[in-house]
Amino acid sequence: MEQFEHKFKIFSCRGSRYLAEKIAASLKTELGKTEVTVFSDGEFQPAYNESVRGATVFIVQSTFPPTENLIELLLMIDAARRASAYKVIAVMPYFGWARQDRKDRPRVSIGAKLVANLLSAAGCDRVMTCDLHADQIQGFFDFPVDHIYASSVFLPYLRSLNIENLSIASPDMGGAKRANAYSRILGVPMIICHKSRAKANVVDSMTAIGEVEDRNIVIVDDMVDTAGTITKCADMLKEKGALSVRAVCTHPVLSGKAYERIAACSLEEFIVTDTIPLRSDVDTSKFSVLSIAPIFAEVIDKVYHFKPISDSFVF
């Protein structure tokens, strides 16, 4: 009897097609064919235009706003499962709702757990994601999670800049672990910015813990939403005598007046990945975009061929 060898196919939802094309190019393959039927009331129905029977199906989609991006991913997973795919793997460079990882006040949802449950109910077998807002979100899943670190692309870039008197800063206490990892690997001092909030997305006051004067500082964060914290942090560090301030951010959510704040603040450079696309109608002259696609392509290839992926991670 002839031995069965399952196929490999990579597809994309509409929101992350730009990134899926890069991943497919790195894998020296082409994206699978899909279509989305949109009804008059806004409801939509994605479909595969080629067979996925017996295939390991990778579906690329970051779940940034609007919510339709998550719903489209769930529908694509369900369609692949019902079309007899061998395995269905969600490639989610940006995992939305990750900030809702606990009950931080009464009568609120734990959105990250709910999304994990939805992925499981849709028929997902595995998730690949990058720089979760909280590492413990991996425990919300009852199937494997490949948690990739964007440091794989950020660290080589920072080294290439050959910055003297470099210090790594965390924009808040919650990011201290991430900043400490960067400072340890690069062998440079660390600074922690302590903030207090008047309410969500509004920073009340901020101060710095560590040596700031005459240092070239790189602020490290996993995601930037309204950019209120990171721009206030940059301006504060500059006022305290920093020679220059850059920022590294994995997920450029950048809602509201974020782009305007970044353009007007003391940041010399804003280094991001392409897990979320930047807007094309605003000033992005301060931005440097590093692609995460080669890292995801490497992990996808290893998972498909049942190879260990531990050496693909920096920390």
Image (cartoon, helix red, strand yellow):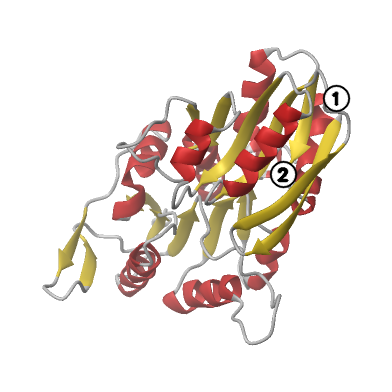
Q: Can I make out residue 70 in this image?
A: yes
Which residue is at a point 33% across and 66% down the rendered structure image? 68
The amino acid sitting under disc 1 is Gly
Query: In the rendered view, would you say 146 is above or below 311?
Result: below
Pointer 2 residue: 171
- Looking at the rendered structure, the number of numbered marks drawn on it comes to 2
Query: In the rendered view, would you say 286 is above or below 99?
Result: above
x and y percent of residue 187 in the render? 85, 25
Residue 166 is left or right of residue 116, and the answer is right
Which residue is at a point 54% across and 60% down the rendered structure image? 127
The amino acid sitting under disc 2 is Pro
- Splitting the image into 4 quarters, where does residue 207 fall? top right
Quadrant assignment for the N terminus: bottom left
x and y percent of residue 218 in the render? 70, 29
- Splitting the image into 4 quarters, where does residue 69 fall? bottom left
Residue nearer the viewer, 109 or 70: 109
Q: From this viewpoint, which residue is outermost toward the left?
A: 40
> How packed is label 2: few (under 14 Cα within 10 Å), some, or many (20 or more)?
many
Which residue is at a point 43% across and 25% down the rendered structure image? 285
x and y percent of residue 32 in the render? 27, 49
Q: From this viewpoint, which residue is outermost toward the bottom?
A: 107
Residue nearer the viewer, 25 or 190: 190
Query: In the rendered view, would you say 305 is above or below 167?
Result: below
Question: Going from the N terminus, do you reach mark 1 or mark 2 first?
Answer: 2
For label 2, the SS is loop
Query: In the rendered view, would you say 76 is above or below 149?
Result: below
Pointer 1 residue: 187
